[in-house]
Amino acid sequence: MKILAIETSSTACSVALLVDNEVRSIHENAPMQQAQKVLLLIDKLLHETGVSLNQLNALTFGCGPGSFTGVRIATSVMQGIGYAMDLPLIPISSLAALAQATYEDLNWKNMLVCIDARIQEVYFGAYQVNDEGLVKKIDKEIVCSPEQIPLSAFDQDKWQAVGNGWDVYQEQILFKPLVKDSLRLPMASGLLSLAKKKYENRDWVKASEALPVYLRDDVAQKKR
């Protein structure tokens, strides 16, 4: 199985490739440069691994929420490759990708993901790791003010915090998690374990059906 992944919903430009059970990735912090870098990084990764586009089984990408421009970049690039190579696409939440990569790196299993959404709002989602080592969301992902995050449902002594929102809005968020990593960004490698399972379950879409997720309804409507 060969799956190519990209994640550009934050300031990072991240690409990764699953070849059977081995993952290779390139992750660069590149604010405002994802459009210029992502195709170059894909080409570099495929060259280094000796894999061509026509050998891929599927494509996966972080569909948001996150930077509007970054999410559109990932969606458009994968749609283009999907059309050209007739490959299925597997859109995956960027918040879930961040949680999955954190679990795989740090073995955290109860994660509250909070990302700065600008204009005094955050993207928030809660995830727990199942017996297969895959994150599953608890309730839906939301966009809200820092004060409106539904944190009363979570025990501070049992949950870990991930994402820059915890630091950006630390004065508004009174919740004190068990441990915190506010510097970690969504990574393409975090998409691959989730995408592999979805591919095995034939849970994919055609390129024309692969859509970004903004969570802000007004943004989505204005950009149609």
Image: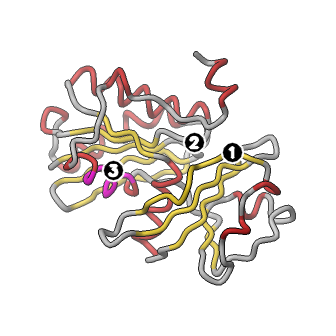
Amino acid under disc 2:
Pro
Q: Are marks 3 and 2 in contact (CB under 8 Å)?
A: no
Give the class, few, some or many, for how many residues have Cα within 10 Å of label 1's Cα (few <14, many ≥20): many
Amino acid under disc 3:
Ala
Q: Position of residue 147 (x, y in %)?
A: 82, 57
Colour convention: secondary structure
Which label number is shown at residue 143? 1
The residue that disc 2 covers is 65
Label 3 to label 2: alpha-carbon separation: 19 Å
In the rendered image, the residue lying farthest to the bottom is 157
Q: Are marks 2 and 1 in contact (CB under 8 Å)?
A: yes
Residue at point 26%, 54% (across, down)? 197
Which stretch did the figure color magenta? 191-197
Image-based side of 77 in relation to 141, left or right:
left
Q: Position of residue 32 (x, y in %)?
A: 61, 36
Label 2 to label 1: alpha-carbon separation: 9 Å
Q: Upstream in the sequence, badge 2 or badge 1?
A: 2
Q: Upstream in the sequence, badge 3 or badge 2?
A: 3
Any magenta on residue 163?
Answer: no
Q: Are marks 1 and 3 in contact (CB under 8 Å)?
A: no
The residue that disc 3 covers is 16
Q: Position of residue 218 (x, y in %)?
A: 70, 26
Q: Quadrant of residue 157?
A: bottom right
Give the class, few, some or many, for how many residues have Cα within 10 Å of label 3's Cα (few <14, many ≥20): many
Please say if 188 is above or below 217.
below
Any magenta on residue 194?
Answer: yes
Residue at point 49%, 51% (across, down)? 28
